[in-house]
Image (spheres, rainbow, N blue to C red):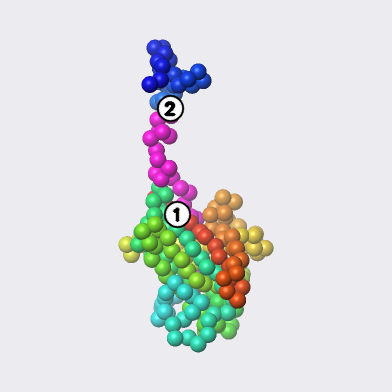
């Protein structure tokens, strides 16, 4: 038991004296476990024009390989791992995470007037279900630029069938980021929350990178 100074409250050794006022002021921090502190939400965007109006037959989490296809998608491989959390830092188990992006030629499944030669080996859209810890993983390609945009991967999170987050993930330090009409609107802190650091791996013969993201759903 600490010694007690009747005027100033309990004392802990010589250096620390906890007055009643100090305890009251500190109480909110002392009582709040780390997991309940608010996390900054992932910045949101709209779907954009290229969310598939009709989903492809294969919508699994491996966008590089279409079921039944002879060859895999072109481009560098990206292992995209992540975690879905709510604003208090709690995992959202069972969340449906969707991604969609253009192929190595800069063409979306839904490209319409952008046309170009589409890579028939690229799935273009995929989904994963977050596990009990909110974790998910995709195998896709490193995003490339297309007309008017810096490279990005669109991402959407659904909880219980309800959309709770739509955003875009960018390549850290890509030269076109600074002039991109969406990326440049974000503050530096927001940009950091949607930027992917790509780390090369030696897993396969093809150029392969990995990255880890955290998606924080507001509220
Ligand atoms: Fe896009």
Q: Secondary structure at mark 2?
A: helix
Q: Does residue 53 show up magenta in the picture?
A: no
Q: Earlier in the sequence, mark 2 or mark 1?
A: 2
Distance CA(mark 2)–CA(mark 1)? 29 Å
Q: Which residues are magenta?
A: 25-50
Residue 131 image offset from top left, x and y in percent? 38, 62
Foreground residue among 24 and 199: 199
Q: Which residue is mark 2?
A: 25
Q: Which residue is mark 1?
A: 216
Classified by dominant secondary structure, the portion drawn in magenta counts as: loop
Q: Is mark 1 within 8 Å of ligand 1?
A: no
Q: Does residue 28 show up magenta in the picture?
A: yes
* 14 in relation to 42, above or below: above
Q: Is residue 57 left or right of residue 147?
A: left
Near mark 2 (Cα within 10 A), the count class, few <14, some 14-19 or many ≥20, is few
Disc assigned to residue 50: none
Near mark 1 (Cα within 10 A), the count class, few <14, some 14-19 or many ≥20, is many
Q: Secondary structure at mark 1?
A: strand
* 104 in relation to 212, above or below: below
Q: Is residue 72 left or right of residue 217?
A: right
For the point 64% across and 63% down, the residue is: 174
Occupied quadrant, residue 133: bottom left
Quarter of the figure that contains the N terminus = top left
Q: Is residue 192 left or right of residue 53?
A: right
Residue 108 image offset from top left, x and y in percent? 52, 76
For the point 42% across and 70% down, the residue is: 127
């Amino acid at each position: 038991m600490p010694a007690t100074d009747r005027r100033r409250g309990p004392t802990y050794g010589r250096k620390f004296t906890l007055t009643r006022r100090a305890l009251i002021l500190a109480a909110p921090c002392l009582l709040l476990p780390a997991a309940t502190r608010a996390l900054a939400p992932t910045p949101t965007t709209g779907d954009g024009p290229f969310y598939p109006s009709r989903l492809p037959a294969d919508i699994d989490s491996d966008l590089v390989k279409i079921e039944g296809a002879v060859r895999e998608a072109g481009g560098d491989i990206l292992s995209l791992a992540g975690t879905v959390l709510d604003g208090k830092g709690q995992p959202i188990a069972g969340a449906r995470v969707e991604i969609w992006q253009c192929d190595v030629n800069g063409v979306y499944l839904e490209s319409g007037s952008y046309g170009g030669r589409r890579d028939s080996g690229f799935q273009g859209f995929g989904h994963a279900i977050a596990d009990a810890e909110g974790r998910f993983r995709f195998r896709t390609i490193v995003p490339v630029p297309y007309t008017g945009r810096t490279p990005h991967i669109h991402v959407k999170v659904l909880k219980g069938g309800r959309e709770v987050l739509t955003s875009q993930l960018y390549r850290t330090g890509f030269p076109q980021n600074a002039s991109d009409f969406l990326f440049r609107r974000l503050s530096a802190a927001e940009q950091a929350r949607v930027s992917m650091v790509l780390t090369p791996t030696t897993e396969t013969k093809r150029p392969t990178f990995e990255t880890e993201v955290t998606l924080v759903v507001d509220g």
